[in-house]
Amino acid sequence: GASSGLGLWCAKALADSGRHFVVLAVRDVEKMKKVAKEMNFPEGSYVAMKLELGSLQSVRDFVANLKAFKSTRRLTNLVCNAAVYRPTDPEPAFTDDGFEMSMGVNHLGHFLLVNLLLDDMSRAKDARVCIVGSITGNTNTVGGGLVYPQADLGNLKGLESGMKNPISMADGKPFFGAKAYKDAKVCNMMTVSELHRRYHEPTGIVFSSMYPGCIAETALFREKRPWFRKAFPWFMKYVTGGYVGMEEAGQRLAQVMDDPQCSKSNVYWSWNGGAQAVGRWSSDGKPKGAGGSGGEIFENQQSGAVKNEVQMKKVWEFSKKAVSLSEKEMFKGGKIEKEFSL
């Protein structure tokens, strides 16, 4: 997800730091090359490679190509940021593999990608994986708890059944586009916790999630109506105080990957209050506490539903089955995985 929005500005920040060579995993390689030049990415600091998260074969091909490209060089950081959001769709769209698009791209594609790269990343010093989360998946926030619909994985009947067409929701219920996105974000954050539980100790990899703030002008909202795309940034900036620009949001994500203070695993990072309340205007004219621009990074608290360990384990096992992740593909041939099987 490096060709626009949060991912692009994160990649830019990491490349500009001079401490990272950045692999830009994108659907359109030529578009990415053009954007990188327009954004003045430093020469020799990046390469664009093909990855379509809506295709499990593309994920596997990308991993093979990445390993061939990097050869013996260490893979130290993995940012999983790509997302689709289809709140206005009356009917579900499906990936090449038959998964509902939000769950297939936002969760299952990333789930497979991370697992296929654990062996390589375990050989690097201070390796980090971040799967971007969202307040919309946390019911202890304004955006997740008060804005309908709430994320709710239910009994996971849909995911347990394989999540293939015509199944379109993790809970097995009829399709609801806005909820599908939120449910996928819950799965993202649960995956981080399970990765930490299973693999932090044997690999040394730091696994984390984060909420960058409400990037109200991102292309993520391209499915929304024109009036919403015009009004929403104003509302988030001047009413709730949750607004953050794309460049600052990208710098926040880059901080999680690069800052020494972010070396703790299984943390959900946020800034400026983490959006657990509507912003309060202070004497300096800037809103405080709504997760928007400014403020310092801190360890935020996820909702009880996201931290549900029973659900968490089921999401992991059902996801592993859905993407046909074999023992051979897993870290150390699946030896550690057997210790945690349901």
Image (spheres, rainbow, N blue to C red):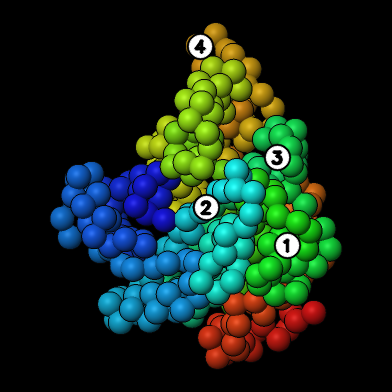
Task: Give the CA distance from mark 1 to mark 2.
Answer: 16 Å
Q: Quadrant of residue 287?
A: top right
**Relative to residue 58, is residue 223 depicted above or below?**
above
Which tag, 3 or 1, sits closer to the chain's start? 3
The residue under the point 49% across, 59% down is: 80
Q: Amino acid under label 1?
A: Ala
Residue at the spot of label 2? 84
Residue at the spot of label 1? 170
**Relative to residue 284, is residue 222 depicted above or below?**
below
Task: Give the CA distance from mark 4 to mark 2.
Answer: 34 Å
Q: Nearer the viewer, mark 4 or mark 3?
A: 3
On the image, the x and y values in percent for residue 74 come to 35, 73
Residue at the spot of label 4? 285
Task: Give the CA distance from mark 4 to mark 3.
Answer: 26 Å
Which tag, 1 or 4, sits closer to the chain's start? 1
Asked if the residues shown at circle 1 and circle 4 are in contact, with their CB atoms under 8 angstroms apart, the answer is no
Task: Give the CA distance from mark 3 to mark 1.
Answer: 17 Å
Q: Amino acid under label 3?
A: Gly
On the image, the x and y values in percent for residue 153 come to 77, 57
Q: Amino acid under label 2?
A: Val
Which tag, 4 or 2, sits closer to the chain's start? 2
**Relative to residue 284, is residue 245 depicted above or below?**
below
Q: Any mark on residue 26, and which?
A: none
Q: Amino acid under label 4?
A: Gly
The residue under the point 53% across, 62% down is: 105
Residue at the spot of label 3? 144
Query: Judging from the image, what secondary structure is the residue with disc 4 in?
Result: loop
* Residue 107 shows in the view: no
Q: Could you classify mark 2 by the number of other residues whose Cα lies within 10 Å: few (under 14), some (14-19), or many (20 or more)?
A: some
**With 144 as the anchor, is 247 left or right in this view?**
left
Asked if the residues shown at circle 3 and circle 1 are in contact, with their CB atoms under 8 angstroms apart, the answer is no
